[in-house]
Image: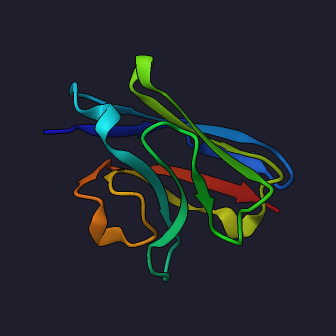
Amino acid sequence: QVHVAESGGGLVQAGGSLRLSCTASGRTFSRYSMGWFRQAPGKEREFVSSINWSGGVTDYADSVKGRFTISRDGAKNTVYLQMNSLKPEDTAVYYCAAGSASRHQYEYPYWGQGTQVTVSS
């Protein structure tokens, strides 16, 4: 029902910035909350951020609070994750998901393929 695809990952030095984009297909896009998750090698996938239908309510993991900003553009069917002051520990595959606003992965039925973010020291 909803196709999700991420882009914008890459290699950046510590302290630098990247902006991830997530596009979603389908006219039901605005009915879903969106979330960003990440998975580093040898670690479990973890919650990063979420945004509700209107874009007025956001949530952030403590590890990224104050550095990352989530936003959405309904007209473009796009969600963004602006990542500033990046740290090597931010290195991971980042996934975009559509579902209910939550920190729990099982509440997001639609997932993208992931985009690699690598932060060098």
User: Observer-nearest residue: 85 or 80?
Assistant: 80
Residue at 78% in and 54% down: 67
Residue 46 located left or right of residue 110? right
Residue 74 located left or right of residue 88? left
Residue at 43% in and 18% down: 76
* Quadrant including the C terminus: bottom right
Colour mapping used in the image? rainbow
Say if 114 sits above or below 78 in the image. below
Say if 101 sits above or below 56 in the image. below
| Image quadrant in which you'd find residue 82 | top right
Residue 45 located left or right of residue 108? right
**Please, which residue is most extreme toward the left here?**
1
**Please, which residue is most extreme toward the top here?**
75
| Image quadrant in which you'd find residue 25 | top left
Say if 3 sits above or below 73 in the image. below
User: Observer-nearest residue: 37 or 88?
Assistant: 37
**Image coords of residue 26 (percent x, y):** 21, 27
| Image quadrant in which you'd find residue 71 | top right
**Image coords of residue 100 (percent x, y):** 33, 57
Label count reads: 0
**Image coords of residue 40 (percent x, y):** 53, 71
* Quadrant including the N terminus: top left
Say if 70 sits above or below 35 in the image. above
**Image coords of residue 55 (percent x, y):** 53, 38
